[in-house]
Amino acid sequence: MRKHLGLILFIVLCTFLIAGCSGSKNVSEDYVSEGPSESFHEEGFPIVDDEITLNIFARKSPPNGPYNEMSMFNKYEEMTNINVEWDDVPQDGFAERKNLEFSSGDLPDVFYKSSISQLEAVKYGTSGILIPLEDLLENYAPNLTALFEEYPEIKSSITAPDGHIYALPAILTLNSARTDKIWVNQTWLDNLGLEQPTSPDELVEVLTAFRDDDPNGNGEQDEIPMTFRNWAQLMNSIIGSWGMIDQMGNHLMVESDEVKFWLTSDKFKEYLQFLNMLYSENLVDRGLFTQEESKFVGNMASGNVGIFWNQTTDAFDKVKQDYEGMSPIVGPYDDQLYPSAPVARDFGTFAITSVNQHPHETMRWIDYFFSEEGSIFFRYGAEGETFNYGDDGLPQYTDDVLNSDLGLGPAIGQFTPWPGGGAPQLVTERNASAINPPEAQDAQGKLDPYLPEAIYGAPIFDEDTTKEVDQIRQDMDQYYEETTSKFITGDLSFDQWEEYVSTIENMGLDRLQEIYQEAYDLNYK
């Protein structure tokens, strides 16, 4: 009897333990299937009559103030009757805290601005920690659903291999928000009697004149002909003029439904040789490989640079009258492509966990920010307090915000979390005057004709494939960056090109191409 009783107690104990381990997932599934609370409203405000509370874990970027003090969120609590208890963690050390949140079992209701990776979405989605969102989206998110219908590539880029959506991206329908513009010092061109360059030879001619002919008129050879934020921006700057851009989040093109990596192509070699010539002739800033962001920004703000790449004019506002946007040059094979980020940017900005007892209300809570009204509210705050509508009908920050001693980004970051990137948001021409002034709009007009017809986002793989891809790419990407940098600086001779090609291929290039081809066929064909 004791043996039987012990066995029964052991089975009961195991049952409770199993129930405890899986309880979070079952709670979430029950709430999703049962529907929202009785006081829930499918439209308008408040979202619920009886106040509910959500615990939200969020990243706090350097420009952001405390989330619980942000006036936009405080007003939104009044509008929705949804109270939020924020756990906003500074960016430094955030990744470690996020990992702890996932592993501790003490989950928040929502991960917000938390940079959930595709691997994390699949790993924690298939294990039940993050819940599938597609049914909630269909029934309680009309704004997001409309955007998915208008831009089908959004849904394709965020759907996991098992057919579920576990996290939401930021959505940028404004081309200007997805590109770095090419800014050329038009005052220098005018001083030297030159036109904007349209070919590699003309680019060299202009940069040489910027270097040698004293375009700033101070009698010194102190001009910077061309500069870049870093190595990555240099690599992407004019590579489209050689017929190559990044697609699917990797160094590949899609031609006639065929995925083709260009890392080892002859065209890529010729592009590197051109960059090497610019570098060796001091036509490009030699400090770009090691400079900090502040140095690049300072160079832009000085007005002593001939050509640089930046999204908008805020960093060089005091000298912006000297600069105009430029079209991409026509390359040696008549290519004139220009890279752009996909519409669905910043994967993993928002996810609902299995402990959330109000998933329907939560989905309505976030969906508002993807409407025109809600997106303006998110980026500008309250009308009459932090913004007003201008004569053109577009929102403009108040003078107090624009002239704040904190600086524009930190001033905005006190009442809304979008500065610093990675937030779940919608960026359109209606709500982006801060990053899309007339000068940036004109510069974007020089690029629009040359953007790719389709921009494919990075695919989501299953967990095993993601690990395989990461293992290949970790070594390959590091070798690619180190070796191409040496080719450009001349520390590595192009006589060693075949060795570079062989090394890349032996790192698993064929397997990587096979994986990305399968992903393309599944998502886009």
Image: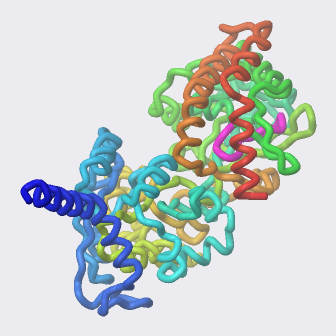
**The residue stretch that appears in magenta:** 240-250
Q: Which quarter of the figure has residue 492?
A: top right
Tell me the quarter of the picture where residue 144 sits.
bottom right
Q: Quadrant of the N terminus?
A: bottom left
Q: Residue at x 33, y 88 (%)?
A: 46
Q: Quadrant of the C terminus?
A: bottom right
Do we see residue 376 in this rendering? no
The question of residue 221 being in magenta is answered with no
Label the magenta part by its dominant secondary structure: loop
On the rendered structure, is 7 left or right of 424? left
Name the one closer to the observer, 125 or 498. Answer: 125
- Extreme right residue here? 333
Q: Residue at x 47, y 55 (%)?
A: 348
Tell me, yes or no, if residue 246 can be seen here.
Answer: yes
Q: Nearer the viewer, residue 89 or 440?
A: 89
Q: Residue furthest left?
A: 2
